[in-house]
Amino acid sequence: MNYKLKVEPMGVEVNCDEDETLLDALLREEIKVKNVCRSGRCGMCKCLVTSGEVDHGDAGSDTLTEPEREEGYALLCTATPLTDVEIEVEESVF
Ligand code: FES
């Protein structure tokens, strides 16, 4: 199943497969966002899910705390979409 992933503040929309992490979908489309470990440990890829639902996958509980999950934060490198999703990210300067 393929979902739409809308990314702010860039205002772009990409497709994201249900088995694909949000980070992989963004990098596939050459949208540069902060990331380091790509395994749910460093927290550099933290984003805010403003609409829709994600599966947090292997996000570490120290890296993405329960209160953060309840506020709508997710890790791009571990989250996969359960619905169409809108997120806010920090653009990478690298
Ligand atoms: S890149 Fe490190 S937690 Fe996502």
Image (cartoon, rainbow, N blue to C red):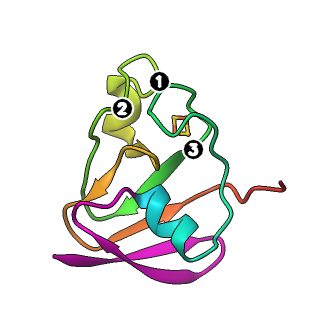
Q: Position of residue 93 (x, y in %)?
A: 84, 56
Residue labelled 3 has its Cβ within 8 Å of some atom of ligand 1: yes
Pointers 3 and 1 in contact (C-beta within 8 Å): no
Q: Is residue 23 above or below residue 73?
A: below
Pointers 1 and 2 in contact (C-beta within 8 Å): yes
> In the displayed image of the protein, which residue is found farthest to the top?
62
With 91 as the anchor, is 49 left or right in this view?
left
Q: Secondary structure at mark 3?
A: loop
Q: Secondary structure at mark 1?
A: loop
Residue labelled 2 has its Cβ within 8 Å of some atom of ligand 1: yes
Range of the magenta residues? 1-21
* Separation of residues labelled 3 and 2 (CA atoms): 11 Å
* Separation of residues labelled 1 and 2 (CA atoms): 7 Å
Read off the residue under disc 3: 45
With 38 as the anchor, is 83 left or right in this view?
left
In the rendered structure, does residue 8 fall within the stretch colored magenta?
yes
Read off the residue under disc 1: 63
Residue 59: which numbered mark, if any? 2
* Separation of residues labelled 3 and 1 (CA atoms): 10 Å
Q: Amino acid type of disc 1?
A: Thr
Q: Amino acid type of disc 2?
A: Ala
| Residue at x-position 44% and y-position 32% | 40
For the C terminus, the quadrant is bottom right
Report crowding for label 1: few under 14, some 14 to 19, many 20 or more residues within 10 A (C-alpha): some
Q: Is residue 17 above or below residue 56?
A: below
Report crowding for label 3: few under 14, some 14 to 19, many 20 or more residues within 10 A (C-alpha): many
| Residue at x-position 28% and y-position 64% | 52
Q: Position of residue 30 (x, y in %)?
A: 64, 73
Report crowding for label 2: few under 14, some 14 to 19, many 20 or more residues within 10 A (C-alpha): many
Q: Position of residue 14 (x, y in %)?
A: 45, 81
